[in-house]
Image (tube, coloured by chain):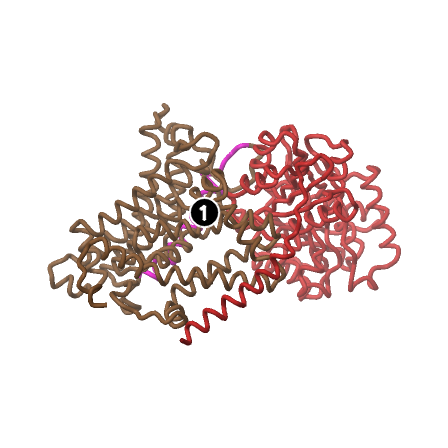
């Protein structure tokens, strides 16, 4: 024990940190999988076959891997959005709404901008414009909540929830009204297809995984860098840990709160943008529903660390994606997957259960979620 | 030590259950073989046991299995719209012969898959084929006939000679056809019996489809205002909005009439006053098309299934024998074409 304490080797420290941070999530997943297996068996299914289907369907072929990456892409962006807010001591429940306004804005720029301008744009201009539009709109949407928090004390949890309603109902209004696809046989609330020039190219011919996935990984790295290597990141984390101390240290707390929400909203908006420009090529009512809420779970499971979020986004993506194959092999209802996910989250969120079962002592700093309802 | 016991116990229990089940792994039939006839079904975003659409279609697939037409039947529930293509591909790659896709939303994914899997027959339930796509048969239903049947029934059963219909938006052609068929049916019954029935048909005209089909309060209010004007039979057509009208009618003691499936079974709160439902016979429609695929007699493009009306259930005693007989005559007449509703496919 003592030699371990004395060891200062950096790699050892990093390994230790990773194993400390991932131990509880790992055990939570394991426990949930075993419990899930028992439940599958209880309702008359074959857990081996079910889990085989889940793994085959998510990692078993290049096509499956590609689909898992497709699922992971919005999860990474949205997970980062929630995690960034966590780091700043804010609970962004509004990723769902920010994602929706981002998707709608990107779709609008994607199909209507060349029409407005009267000439077509090259991809190198059109695609970034579409993505930036979505990011900006998401940022503004969340920024409003940040401003309310900073200057009126309005709690961000309530305000992001309210902004979700506004976003989703506005989206519904637009998709059924001015932005509706007017092709004669269409009865669905959706936008027209975006122009070819606003579409993100696929990485490989014949697979759906697109460059948005690479962008997601890059953005995850960027957020890690932002949080840990820049002054702004330091300010965000300090405000998150203790706003009074941050104020005393000369940090502009109000500005930091607004910036944190804007950045968080931009990430969530990006999730919507990428779904439109990289995958669906339009926005449709009912697409991308629930990603903003899954993102909260992903941020929690990933302990708000960008690497953790990429990994937990992959876990969620694999479960969602593998569910098809699992159903195909066992005819188990798809709800089972949601239930296993919920079990994982339950154990991660209430990590005292896992710590109790496996007798793990808590050590080090705890993840800071929010400073409570009093703000 | 306590922890160790717990973990060990957990693992032992788990492994026992796992091995017990592992022994009886089913031997999957090989659908790529010529002689094995396999049918897969992909639901719209919705459950296989939704007591509506998806369930009726799946029962049709199961029927083909029970009748010995299909050797293997499987379904996949779609959890997210972006999985449409992937879920269809699951069956396509496994060498299935028929893939049933349920709902208008899967239309584009179905057409795209038909190009990828030229040897598969696709049956698109409620997917109207504006253009014929090779390999795709769109199974549609004459909603106007179903509306016609319950319209005639309502007119014959009404004591006040005033009946109503509360529907989703008339922008969706099937909903409009239900409503117009209802009017036509009431007029037909009047013509037969020499009565004059006043028919109120109201469509929800709010902005969003999500709203027009999910507004039970509006449905209930509209039904109540119709009953205030003397209507004593209410037809609710259009998702939850219609359900609101049906429930309000039943609570007020009027006759309630459901839509799509036999809603006596799906709306227990309205069941005691449920007169009938305007039904699309999805189950036999799907089963027939699967059989036609095996026979080789199936064609691309639009195929029309049959419409019907649900049993009277609790109110069976209230329906006079002559009304029952007339309903059967009308149903037969609609089937053989001797009675037509005069309702065009889309709103002019």
| Residue occupied by mark 1 | A288
Quarter of the figure that contains the N terminus of chain A: bottom left
Queried whether the magenta region covers residue B224, the answer comes back as no
**In this picture, which residue range is highlighted in magenta?**
A156-183
- Which chain corresponds to the colour red? B
Q: Which of the two residues, A34 or B281, is positioned nearer the viewer here?
A: A34
Q: Residue furthest bottom?
A: B2
Q: Residue furthest top?
A: A119
Give me the residue at 47% from left, 62% from top.
A32
Queried whether the magenta region covers residue A163, the answer comes back as yes
Give me the residue at 36% from left, 72% from top.
A359
Left or right of A223, for residue A357: right
> A151 above or below B308?
below
Q: Residue furthest front?
A: A3
Q: Which of the two residues, B232 or B53, is positioned nearer the viewer here?
A: B53
Q: Which of the two residues, A42 or B301, is positioned nearer the viewer here?
A: A42
Count of numbered marks: 1
Q: Colour of chain A?
A: brown
Q: Position of residue B40 (x, y in %)?
A: 65, 43
Chain of the residue under the numbered disc 1 shown in the image: A
- Observer able to see residue A88: yes
* Main secondary structure along the magenta-highlighted residues: helix
Q: Position of residue A184 (x, y in %)?
A: 56, 32
Give the class, few, some or many, for how many residues have Cα within 10 Å of label 1's Cα (few <14, many ≥20).
many
Left or right of B159, for residue A38: left
- Observer able to see residue A111: no
Left or right of A262, for residue B106: right
Quarter location, residue B233: bottom right
Quarter of the figure that contains the C terminus of chain A: bottom left
> A237 above or below B118?
below
Q: Position of residue A321 (x, y in %)?
A: 49, 47
């Amino acid at each position: 024990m003592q030699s371990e304490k004395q060891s200062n080797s950096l790699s050892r420290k990093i390994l230790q940190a990773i194993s400390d941070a991932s131990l509880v999530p790992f055990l939570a997943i394991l426990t949930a999988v075993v419990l899930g297996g028992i439940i599958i068996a209880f309702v008359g299914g074959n857990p081996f076959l079910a889990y085989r289907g889940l793994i085959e369907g998510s990692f078993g072929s290049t096509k499956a891997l590609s689909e898992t990456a497709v699922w992971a892409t919005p999860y990474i962006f949205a997970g980062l959005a929630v995690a960034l807010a966590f780091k700043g001591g804010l609970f962004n429940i509004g990723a769902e709404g920010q994602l929706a306004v981002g998707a709608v804005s990107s779709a609008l720029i994607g199909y209507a901008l060349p029409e407005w301008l009267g000439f077509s744009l090259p991809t190198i201009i059109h695609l970034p414009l579409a993505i930036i539009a979505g990011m900006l709109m998401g940022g503004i949407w969340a920024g409003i909540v940040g401003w309310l928090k900073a200057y009126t004390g309005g709690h961000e949890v309530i305000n992001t929830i309210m902004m979700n309603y506004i976003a989703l109902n506005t989206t519904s209004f637009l998709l059924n009204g001015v932005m509706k696809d007017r092709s004669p046989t269409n009865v669905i609330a959706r936008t027209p297809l975006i122009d070819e020039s606003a579409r993100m190219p696929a990485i490989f011919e014949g697979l759906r995984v697109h460059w948005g996935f690479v962008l997601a990984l890059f953005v995850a790295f960027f957020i890690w860098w932002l949080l840990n290597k820049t002054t702004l990141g330091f300010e965000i984390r300090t405000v998150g840990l203790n706003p009074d101390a941050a104020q005393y240290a000369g940090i502009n707390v109000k500005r930091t709160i607004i910036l944190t929400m804007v950045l968080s909203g931009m990430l969530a908006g990006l999730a919507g943008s990428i779904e439109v420009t990289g995958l669906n090529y339009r926005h449709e009512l009912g697409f991308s529903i629930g990603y903003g809420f899954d993102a909260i779970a992903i941020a929690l499971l990933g302990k708000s660390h960008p690497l953790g979020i990429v990994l937990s986004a992959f876990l969620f993506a694999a479960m969602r994606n593998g569910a098809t194959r699992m159903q195909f092999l066992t005819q188990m209802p798809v709800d089972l997957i949601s239930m296993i996910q919920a079990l994982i989250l339950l154990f991660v969120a209430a990590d005292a259960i896992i710590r109790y079962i496996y007798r793990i002592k808590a050590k080090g700093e705890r993840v800071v979620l929010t400073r409570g309802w009093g703000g | 030590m306590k922890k160790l016991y717990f973990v060990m116990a957990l693992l032992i229990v788990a492994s026992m259950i796992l091995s017990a089940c592992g022994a009886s792994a089913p031997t999957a039939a090989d659908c790529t073989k010529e002689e094995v006839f396999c049918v897969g079904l992909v639901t719209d975003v919705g459950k296989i046991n939704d007591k509506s659409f998806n369930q009726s279609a799946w029962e049709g697939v199961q029927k083909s299995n029970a009748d010995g037409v299909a050797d293997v039947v499987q379904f996949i529930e779609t959890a997210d719209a972006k999985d449409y293509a992937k879920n269809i591909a699951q069956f396509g790659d496994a060498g299935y012969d028929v893939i049933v896709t349920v709902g208008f939303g899967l239309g584009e994914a179905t057409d795209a898959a038909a190009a990828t899997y030229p040897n598969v027959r696709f049956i698109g339930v409620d997917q109207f084929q504006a253009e014929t796509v090779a390999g795709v048969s769109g199974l549609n239903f004459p909603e106007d006939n179903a509306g016609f049947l319950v319209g005639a029934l309502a007119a014959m059963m009404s004591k006040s000679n005033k009946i109503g219909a509360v529907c989703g938006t008339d922008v969706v052609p099937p909903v409009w056809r239900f409503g117009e068929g209802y009017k036509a049916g009431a007029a037909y019954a009047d013509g037969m019996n020499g009565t004059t029935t006043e028919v109120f048909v109201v469509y929800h005209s709010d902005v969003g489809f999500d709203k027009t089909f999910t507004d039970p309060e509006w449905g209930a209010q509209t039904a109540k205002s119709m009953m205030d004007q003397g209507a004593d039979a209410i037809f609710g057509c259009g998702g939850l909005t219609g359900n609101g009208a049906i429930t309000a009618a039943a609570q007020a003691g009027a006759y309630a009439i459901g839509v799509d499936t036999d809603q006596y079974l799906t709306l227990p709160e309205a069941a005691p006053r449920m007169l009938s439902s305007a039904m699309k016979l999805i189950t036999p429609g799907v089963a027939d098309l699967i059989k036609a695929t095996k026979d080789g007699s199936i064609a691309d493009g639009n195929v029309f299934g049959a419409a019907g009306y649900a049993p009277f259930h609790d109110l069976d005693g209230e329906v006079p024998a002559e009304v029952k007989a007339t309903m059967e005559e009308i149903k037969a007449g609609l089937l053989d074409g001797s009675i037509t509703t005069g309702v065009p496919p889309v709103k002019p």
